[in-house]
Each structure stands twice: as C-alpha cells, then as structure tokens.
Image (spheres, coloured by chain):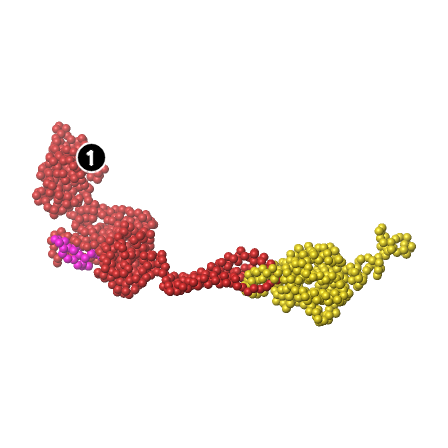
Chain colours: A yellow, B red
Amino acid sequence: MAGHRYLRPEDIRKLQTFEFAPKALVEGYLQGRHRSRSRGSSIEFHEYREYTPGDDLKLIDWRVFARSDKHFLRTFEQETNLECHIFLDSSASMGFDGGSEISKLEYGSFFAAALSYLVVRYGDRVSLQTFDETIREYFPPGSTNTHLHRILGALERNTPGKETSVAEALMKAAPLLTRKGILVVVSDFFDNPADIFQALSPYLHRGFRVHLFHLLTPGELDLEQRGLTTYRDLETSTRLIAHPSALKERYKEAIEEHIGSLRQLAQRRSVDYSLHRTDSHFFRLFDKLIV
Amino acid sequence: MSFNFLNPNLLWLLALALVPLLLHLFARTKPPVYEFSSVEFLRKIIRKTMRLKKPQDYLLLALRTLAVLALIGAFLRPLLFSQEKLSGLFQKKSLVAIVDASASMAYVEGAQTRFATACAETSELLSGLSARDQANIIWMKAEPESVFPDELASNLGYLKDQLRRASVTVERGSLDKSFALALELLAEAEGKKEICIVSDFQATAWEDFSPAVPEGVDLIHVRIGKREAGNRAIVDLSFEPSRPVVGEEIAVYAEIQNFSSEDVETTVFSEVGENRRSQNLSLPAGQRITTTFRHTVSSAGPTPIRISLTEDAFPADDQRMAVAEVRPYLRLAMIGEHDPDTARIWTRAAQALQWAVPEWVSPADLTTESVNGFDAVFWSGTPSEEALALFAAAGETLKFVLQPAPGDLPPSLFPDSTDSISVAKESSGDELYSISIADPDAELFELFRGDDHGDLDGLSGKDRLRLSNVPGGKSLLQFSDGSPALLEATPRRYLWLLPLSGEPGNFAGRVEFLPFFAEFLLSNRLTGVGVNQYIYEPGDPVLWEAPEPIGRDDLRLLGPDKEELEFQAAEGQQWMAQPFDRPGIFPWQLGDNPIGYSVVNFPPTESNLASLTREQTQDSASVAVEGGSEVRQLRDGIPLWPWLLAAAVCFFLLESGVTFWAARTP
C-alpha cells in the first residue's frame, strides 16, 4: 500500500488496530461478519414461524409438522458483507485551507482513503463518488485491493472543481446505489440544509445509514483578523470588500446558525452529523463512525 | 459680512481637503484580495448592515474633510468682518471719539458710572489704533470741547491719560455741536475717517438725532449702559404767585416723574425760606405727578425755594430750585385821565389794603423801568399806543386794568379783532342797570361763594360803558342785557365797564367792594419762577443783570457752598460768569445782601435714563456696537483661527467617536 499520497504507511499502521464495524446491521451481497435480517436459506437458524399462504414450501420443517401436525417454517439469519458509499465533496470551496496545513479536500481525501482501506481490509465493499455541482467520478462498490488502488489513485488525481451542490449530487447518485449500506458524505455543506436533507430522503427511505462529516477550516469558523479585505469567492469568483473586524461577530453567528440548522435536521431524520475542524487529525472522524 | 486671510499664501493648502476623499476612495478600491471558500454568509451580513455602514462611511468622510478644512483654515488665519464698510485692516485711520459727558452718564451701573465705562471703551478703541493712526476726543456736553484743540494727533497715550482723568458733567449734551466739531476735525484728516460716538444714547436726547454723515466718514455708535435704568426726578418747579407779597401764601408746584418700570414710594421735601414741608408720594411706574406745597412767606426779599426727593441711585436730579422775589407790597399805578372819580375809588380801595400801595402816575412819566416796577396799572382814559407797547413789553406779570373813555379803543387792545371797536357811555335813566356774575366759576368770585364776605347779587348802576361789539375775551361781570361789565379782553388785560359812582347802585359804597377789589388784585396772578432771577442749566453761559448800577468791587458772586466765584462786566448793567458746573443757587451779593440769584437746575432732559435699542441707534449711515472691543473687531476683523482650531479638534474627536462606535456596532 505504500506510495499513495492519502494512505501513508503510518496511517496504515494505526489502522491495523481499528476494527471497522458499522453501528447498524446492513444487508450484504457476500457472506460476511455482518448479520442481516434478510431471511434466507443458509447459514444460521434464526427461529420458527407459522406458515402463511404464499410461503416457500421448501422452508417448511416437516419434522415439526410430524410432531405437532402444524406447519412451521424454519428461518435463518444471513451473514452478509457491508457496502460503504463514500461521497466526497470536490467543489472549489473544498480547496480552501483557511489557516490549516491542508485543505478541506485533502483532509477529506485522507479520511476517504483510510475508510476505503479499512472497509476493503475486512472484506467489505466500498464505493467512492466525487462531486461538485454534479458527479465528477464514481467507483462502484468493490472489495478487492485493485479496487482500493483505483480509489486511491482517483483521490490523488482529484482537484477542487466548481460550485458545490451537495443536494444535486446526492439526487443524481441515488439510482447508482442498488443496495443499501452506509452512506458517508464528506463536505463543507455550503448548501441549503433543507435541500441537502431533501436529497437524502430517498437514501433514508431505502434504509441507508447516513453519516455526514462537515469539514470546516478554523478560518471559516472564525474570520481571520485582517484589515479591509477583498474577499473572492473560490466557487463563484464573486468579490466582496469588507472589514472582517466589523463582520466577525455576525459571521460567527451566521455560520453557527448554519451548523445548528444542519445538526437539527440530522437529529430529526436520524442522521449522524458531526462537525470537524481541519486542524484536528482525520482519525477523529472514525470516532463517529466505528463502534 | 466678508472674510480676509492673514496668510493668503497658504491657500494652496486647501487642496489637502481632498486627501480624506482620496484616502476614502483609495481604501475602497485597493484592499488586498483574499480567496475565501464562500462569501455567501458575508454577503448576507453586509446586505443587512449596508444601510448603516454607508451613512457611517459618508459621515466619517464628511467629518475628516471638515476637520482637515478647519485645520487648514486655522493656518490661513481668516478674519471675519461683520460690517464690510468698517473693515479697514492695514489702512491709516483718523478717529474722532465723541465721548458723552452729559449728566445721564453719571448714572452708576454695576461698579462704575456709565461715563467711566465710556472712557474705558474709548481707551479700548484707541488701543486698536496703530502708531501711524491719528485720533482726538470730543467731550460731549453743553459746549463740546476736544482734547487736541484743532486737529487730530498720534499721541494716543495723552488721549488715554485724559480719559483716565476725565469726569462727567451735570450738563446736557449738545449732539449737533459735538458732531459738527467732529466733522470739522476730520475735514483735513487723511486715511479712513471714523467718528465713534460713545454714549448711553438716551432716548429723549437721541431719538430725533439723525446727522448727515458725509461720504467717506464712518459713524459708529458705541452703546454704553442698559436699556432701562430706574430713576425718579423732579422735572419741573413753579410757584404762584410769581411775585408774592409778604404774608401771602405761595403755592409751590413740583412735577415728579418716575422713569422706572416699577411703582416707587418716595418723600418730597419743600423748603421755602425757613419753612419746610414734606409729603410721602407713591409714584406709579412711568408716570408724572404734580404735587403742591403751600407756604406763607413772612419776610420780603429773595426767598430760595428748594424741592428735593429722597435720594435714589441717580441723585443729581433729585432736587430743583427757584427763588421767589417776595415783595413787601403790591405797587399799583393809578392814572385818572378820563374819570378821576373811578381812579380815586380804586386808590382808596388799594389804600385800605395793607399789602398794596397805589401811586398816581402821569402817562407821560411811564418808562420801561417804571412799568416793570408796578404789579398793576389802573388806567381811566384812553392809553396811547406807546403806553400799551410798554405794558406789552412788561409781559404778563403786569396786570392792566382800563376804564376806557368813550370813543374808539386802541386796536392793540384786541389784537385778534379786525373791526374797530368803540365804547359809548350810556345812562339807564330811571331804571338802573342790574349787574350779575357772568362766570360764577371764575377764581375771582371764589371768596363770595360763601356768605362771609357778602353777596355780589343785586349790583346795579345808573351809567355804564358799552362796547360797540365784543370781539372776544371773557366776561366776568355783565349787565342784564349781556353787555360785559368787567371783561378780560386778553390774559391779564381787563376792561372796566361798570360804574363805581353815582346814586343809586353805587358798587363802591357796598361792603362787598373792598374784598372784590382785593380779590381782583390777587386773582389770576402769574404762575412762574419769579422775576429778576436767572434759571440756567449747568454749562450754560451765565449772564446776570443788576437792578441798578453797581461797581465791580461791591458785587460778589457766591457758589452754593458760599465760595466766591469769578465774574466780569458785560454790557450795561450785565455781569458775566463762567458756566456753572453744578446745580445750585448762586447769589449775587452787594456786600452781604443778596440782590439777585442765578439758579442752576439739573437739565430735565437728562433724567430719563432709558436708552435707545441697538436697532434704533443703527441705520444706513451708522453702525451700532456694544463696546470698543467690538469696534476693533469690526475694523480689524474677528480672528477665526481659534474657533477653527477648536472646530478641527471637535471634528477629529467626533470622527474618533464615530469610528469607535462603528467598530463596536455589530
């Protein structure tokens, strides 16, 4: 695994100690460690259930019928593999470092690489989607090392794009995901919170476990002290002359209001939401993800 | 109003006023570019605060520009000239200051008199002049005089010294003479010519003063004193009769005026000879009251009369004086040309009175001097025009009673009539003429309104004199057909037309005749200030005429404090003295006996201390100011740099305040 920018050897060593398991059970395509409530014919007995018309006759336990003269079906729990879908915001605003050593995109890329490695390492499937106002690149779920290399290569090639539209990207990606799993969205979420959660609705409806990782630099959380400044928007190139000291407090209130709005909507929709400063280590993101 | 700059060569600094604007514009366009992830939040915030921020920016720009302008203005040292025509910076000036030294300037306001204030303000005026300027001072009084006799001079130190030594007079100020003198002094002067009148501008004296100011002369009124000053004064004094007789009652009339706007209680004292009376008076605000004192004089000769008030803040006008020439008896001239009987009856009646002495006089002996010595002339006959001219010259102090002879009357008896008037003698025959009182309200009949002195009803006579027509006058007694029996043709000129002799109806034989005759002598006597005395105001030239030729060594003139004063002979029996500088009674004495008086009273025009308003003292020809320093400001301009400096500091402080406030405002 050596030689990849976003998956450094020291990170791999640390990740050896991580045991990746999602907080919730997911349905897997391959048999794995993760139990699924999908009832099937293989693996481990789960319970007996009384027959109802339409059930598969092959599942009837005739021994029980012989003893009790009643039709009971044997049900089993399947052990299946996990699918983890990583959505990495690659808009222009993610290229902002705001006083940190790395930009938000780099920070998110480190996290995406580590998560991919962890998922593949445990035999689960991982997909990656980079987007700005639309889907820029998509790697379908896979669990092989080759798949992991492709993802890592894509992350290295990835550069900040155009304007952010998390909601639009999510809506466009929904048909691509055929199986439910874990949806990990890494973004600065400079979009309308209501639109974002409206775009998440199909995923939630289909049973996806959604994790939103909100990345902001220290300079975005708190305006830097500087004189009269021409602010140029990285996404729209809009220029705005302002005195940060005059706006500092109001800006802080506005960004906190935005964060609060995201957090409130996430809580209401049972979505995991966490805010992360880019001056902290990206491993801390796993605290919110791994049991 | 105009401006001038002491440092006009620094006007280019005004361009610096653009610096704040340029900085403002520069600061708006050149801030460093900072690439930010999203300016959407910033945009929303700015959109909310833009309404506030923009006015703040403009306010700061305005404050900074004003501060810089004020600072530059201070360096330019501008001078403000509120009266353009007085602005005379750098010009040579010729100044004549007319300082009001009249009596009203003695009023004490605050710690000093108006005059002292006027001198201080004039000194301030002079301090504003440079070494090349010239000036003079005119003291405005009855006879104005200048410090330098005929010209202006540069010796301002001497003028200031004179101002320190000057004292106010009790004279009235002669406005016209002072102004004329000022113009005379300025006639040959060079440079910018100014006349500064430093006065309290008494309303009574200055209201109608509007001098013609020649072209090229600036007239400045420097006002001293407040608009109002409470004062009460005795403004007039008279007494009657004008020539009282020993034992006769003198009525002294004093007019007292309250010039203040508040009611005042005061005590008035009257002193006639040794007699002294007093009255308490309540003087309503702004009102004039006449009060009367009655004294009886017991000795003949000149008798001083003095009316005084309780002293107030302006005591100079709290007394007024006169001298009554008390005569031992009335001198009556009797002329019986036509009807000696009537003249004899008049004479006998006069002889019966202790205070009247009749003297038979021949018309040919009448002279001006002899006529002036009589109190009344009783003439039976027809006087010549020359004699009537003598009586007219004697004035109204002389009572003239004529019983005309039948025929035409001299026209001068009735100067208002164009018709010739004749008189005819008529006899009633068997029936007597009845005579009655024509004017019951006349003073003459006051004595007979009671029963103590008889009754004038039922008078009658056999003969009478009848006028061809009655041209006017006032009938005192009349016949039953309305024809006058005793007619006052003109004031103190009487026609005696009633019979005094003959039977029956002999008026002279009745008991009422003597009191009637006495009343006739005493009634309608002239009210006045006496005779053979001279009333002056301080500063007036003094001229006194002796009643008889007197040698210089025998005559003395004394002041109110008995000090001897200088005098010199004038024409005839006249003597001349220096103008008196204070009110009082100045006796002319022959040895130790006063033979005449010169009385000096406070000029009544100076008693009303109310001043004209500033607007009233200022017109197109003059400028009114409140002090000498203001004249200097008008002339030399008001330096504005301290104000501009202060304004600059204020603007900078305000700018700091606004900046601080803007920084704290979210």
**Protein chain holding label 1:** B
Q: Secondary structure at mark 1?
A: strand
Q: Nearer the viewer, residue B43 or B581?
A: B43
- Is B2 left, or right, of B499 in this rendering? right
- Residue found 90% across the figure and 54% down from its top: A65
- Is A32 left, or right, of A166 in this rendering? right
Q: Nearer the viewer, residue B5 or B353?
A: B5
Q: How many marks?
A: 1
What is the x, y in percent for residue B530? 19, 48
- Is B207 left, or right, of B392 in this rendering? right
- Residue found 9% across the figure and 39% down from its top: B336
Q: Residues within 10 Å of mark 1 (few under 14, many from 20)?
A: many
Confirm whether residue B427 shows in the render: yes
What is the x, y in percent for residue B215? 27, 55
* Magenta region, residue range: B563-591
Q: In the rendered image of this protein, does residue A176 appear above or below residue B480?
A: below
Q: Nearer the viewer, residue B320 or A35?
A: A35
Q: Label 1 is placed on what type of residue? A: Ile
What is the x, y in percent for residue B593? 15, 54
- Check the image and name the residue furthest to the top: B430
The residue where tag 1 is placed is B437
